[in-house]
Amino acid sequence: MELIITYPKLFFITLTLVLLFFFRKNNKRRVFLVDFACYKPPKNQQVDRQTFIDKSTKTLCYNKDSLEFMDKMLERSGLGDKTYLSKGLLKEPIDMSAEAAKEEVEMAIFGVIDELLLKTGVQCKDIGVLITVFCGYNIMPSVSSVIVKRYNLRHDIRTYNVTGMGCTAGLVALGLVQNLLKVHDNSCALVVTSESSTANVYKGNDRSKLLTNCIFRLGAVALLLSNKLSDLNTSKYELIHTVRSQTSDDDRSYNCIFMEEDVEGHRGVTINKDLLYAAMKTIRLNISTVAPLVLPLSEKFRYLVNLISTKSKVESYSPNFSKSIDHFFPHVGGKPVLDDLQKKLGFSDEQMEASRMTLYRIGNTSSSSIWYEVAYAEAKGRVKKGDALWQIAFGSGFKCNTVIWKAIRSVNCDEMNPWRDEIHEFPVDVSGIEVVPDLFVASN
């Protein structure tokens, strides 16, 4: 005490340094989602089941068995009659040229970026990071370069082009953004996700490659993220956790989704009978990491007891995530996977509604699908301040990724929400759709 009285300045300097140390140690740089925009194509690009089959019959050389198989898949896929295809695939005859694919992609990504810039008011000069996400569509110069040129972005912008990582790539990109914004102060990041259906049509008759033709549809999303504290009050969500898992070391997982040529030289994506096995195995692995991060204390205790008392650990434990997660947005890979996730994780029909309605109305748009789900929940006025949102996506490799968000404020349906004009028509009853698993895991 005598020392403190004798040297008051030294005491206060020391105290200040200690407080600064603990402040810096515990003050992790926060990442906010300012806003996002989903692409809604024109009505003249909507396609119903019969139109799809008619187009396939007239233009592509599918045999009778292939056409019947695709018709069954469409009937039992969970897709409705108002999903979207590209202009090229709706032309007579079908146009699958590189130019048609380029037109499809640019209409989608420029559309969502323009909308996002309008919604947020952000200036192009303030964007310091750009990440583009595609699976099968890959050009040179890259899509990120196309965007830099179109919007005259900064010469020192950090650009990344993520390709070939399947339907989970959009969440992989968010993990990358989270790491980049940890080290770059006062920055904004633009993430753009889409895919080209035009460039990825399979033209042969191998059943294991026909599924992608049937369930994949046109869509895109653009996200604006920021680590600026000044953006806190105007942002929608805060990024809390990102979790990545993969089982590529397992041959069955690695080979269950594979791009290759058939015996006639037609390139396509093979989806074999191991898909559900790989999906469930990798999802369980991911959930085992997510559980301790988000579950309430009572569920964590059950989780610990399970780990101690059982050898199978993950498989025998089914925690009730609905106690800590308000909104669940799984990738719309197919109705069988959605059914299994709902059963194992304890989510209600309402919590699964956004994913089922997105599959029905929009279809599988690859890694942008989960954002149509978030937009659905917003359009319904269900997202309230403090709510926890869980996005989980899975894809080739096999990989599974999770992102956990916290709602900074209550979110209502805005004028640019893709569901705004028709949200009153949903939900629709899809419980009567009979799913035959063999349709989704066609064997070679």
Image: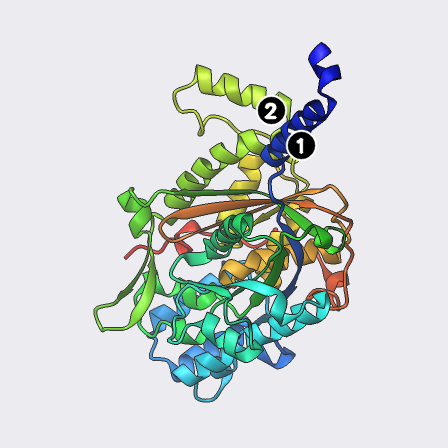
Q: Out of 94 and 10, give the one closest to the viewer.
A: 10
Q: Please give left or right for residue 364 compared with residue 27 in the image.
A: left
Quadrant (top left, top right, bottom left, bottom right) of the N terminus = top right
Under mark 2, the amino acid is Glu
User: Extreme front residue here?
Assistant: 6
Above or below 314: residue 57: below
Quarter holding residue 187: bottom right
Q: Position of residue 331 (x, y in %)?
A: 53, 52
Q: Is residue 393 visible?
A: yes
Q: Would you name the residue on which mark 2 appears?
A: 299
Q: Out of 394 and 118, give the one closest to the viewer.
A: 118
Residue at 54% across, 47% down: 182
Above or below 398: residue 215: below
- Mark-to-mark CA distance, 1 and 2: 9 Å
Specify few, some or many for label 2: CA neighbours under 10 Å numbering under 14, 14-19, or 20 or more: some
Quadrant (top left, top right, bottom left, bottom right) of the C terminus = bottom left
Badge 2 element: helix
Above or below 210: residue 342: above
The label number, if any, that marks residue 323 in the structure image: 1
Above or below 381: residue 46: below
Which of the colour schemes (rainbow, by chain, secondary structure, one colour) is used? rainbow
The label number, if any, that marks residue 96 in the structure image: none
